[in-house]
Image (tube, rainbow, N blue to C red):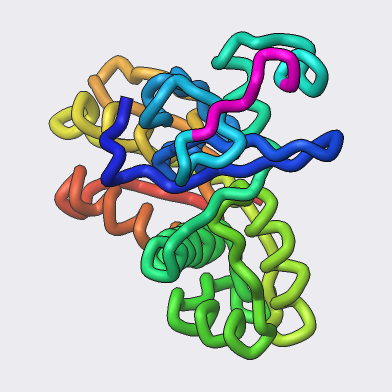
């Protein structure tokens, strides 16, 4: 369980009743986004309250009426996922800024300007989000936020998600390291080890990281690798 000093109130109102639990806002946000985290790791007390500030517990009768159980774990999960989590202004500001950074990073790595074939710099995406007045809810999933952000950006800047396929040949001296480094950043569709010890593969990468991928290949092979875009 977490410290009371780190806890905020998560509140749910249902059937004319109010239920509150004490949670860590960061862990609660991760649970809402689908991570499987033990409830005990997210709460400061194994109690459901009518009023947490006054330590007034909800009665078993009320819990059964609304949740059909008195077990803490399913009730707490329901409150975390469906209820309102009270944050201080500083907590909300920090969580929103971090989620915004994640959205910008994801779009910069996975999207391109179709007019140039190159990714948009993170600063350009950030400015366009400001212009479009994109709202970031820190408790929504990254997938949902990216989808809504892309919809808001398209009227302002040319942007789309795109993947590219590349054929890569790594010379024998660098092939063992190349396999590990490349598989960490790309989807390997095909691969083949040659008799001379070189390694050939076909990979799929987000178009937005194309330049970074070339830099990685050159670093691995000291500039001796071969790459080719497959249409």
Compare residues 130 and 75 and report the one nearer the observer. Answer: 75
Q: Examine the rendered structure and indicate whether residue 150 appears above or below residue 34.
A: below
Could you say where residue 216 lies in the image, as x and y percent from the top left? 27, 51
Counting the numbered discs, the total is 0
Instruction: Give the magenta part as a residue range.
Output: 56-62
Asked if residue 105 can be seen in this view, the reply is no
Residue 58 inside the magenta-drawn segment: yes
Look at 65% across and 20% down and name the residue there: 59
Residue 68 appears left or right of 103:
right
Q: Residue furthest bottom?
A: 131
Residue 180 appears left or right of 213:
left
Q: Residue furthest right?
A: 15
Q: Would you identify the image quadrant in which residue 138 lies? A: bottom right
Look at 55% across and 43% down and name the residue there: 10
Q: Considering the image in quadrants, where does the N terminus appear?
A: top left
Could you say where residue 6 lies in the image, as x and y percent from the top left? 30, 45
Residue 49 inside the magenta-drawn segment: no
Look at 19% across and 51% down and name the residue there: 219
Asked if residue 155 can be seen in this view, the reply is yes
Look at 60% across and 84% down and name the residue there: 128
Q: Would you identify the image quadrant in which residue 149 lies? A: bottom right
Could you say where residue 163 lies in the image, as x and y percent from the top left? 62, 51
Residue 79 appears left or right of 192:
right
Q: Examine the rendered structure and indicate whether residue 229 appears above or below residue 36.
A: below
């Amino acid at each position: 369980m977490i410290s009371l000093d780190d806890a905020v109130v998560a509140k749910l109102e249902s059937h004319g009743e109010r239920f509150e639990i004490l949670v860590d806002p960061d862990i609660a946000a991760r649970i809402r986004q689908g991570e499987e985290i033990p409830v005990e790791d997210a709460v400061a007390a194994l109690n459901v309250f009518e009023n947490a500030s006054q330590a007034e517990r909800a009665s078993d009768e009320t819990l059964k009426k609304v949740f059909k159980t008195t077990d803490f774990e399913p009730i707490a999960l329901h409150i975390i996922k469906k209820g309102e989590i009270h944050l201080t202004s500083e907590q909300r500001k920090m969580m929103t800024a971090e989620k915004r950074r994640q959205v910008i990073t994801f779009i910069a790595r996975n999207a391109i300007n179709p007019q140039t074939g190159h990714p948009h710099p993170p600063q350009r995406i950030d400015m366009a989000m400001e212009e479009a007045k994109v709202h970031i809810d820190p408790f929504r999933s990254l997938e949902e936020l990216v989808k809504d952000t892309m919809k808001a950006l398209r009227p302002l800047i040319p942007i789309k998600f795109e993947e590219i396929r590349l054929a890569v040949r790594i010379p024998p001296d660098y092939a063992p390291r190349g396999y590990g480094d490349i598989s960490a950043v790309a989807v390997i569709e095909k691969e083949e080890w040659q008799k001379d010890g070189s390694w050939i593969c076909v990979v799929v990468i987000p178009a937005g990281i194309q330049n970074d991928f070339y830099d990685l290949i050159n670093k691995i092979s000291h500039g001796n690798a071969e790459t080719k875009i497959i249409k």
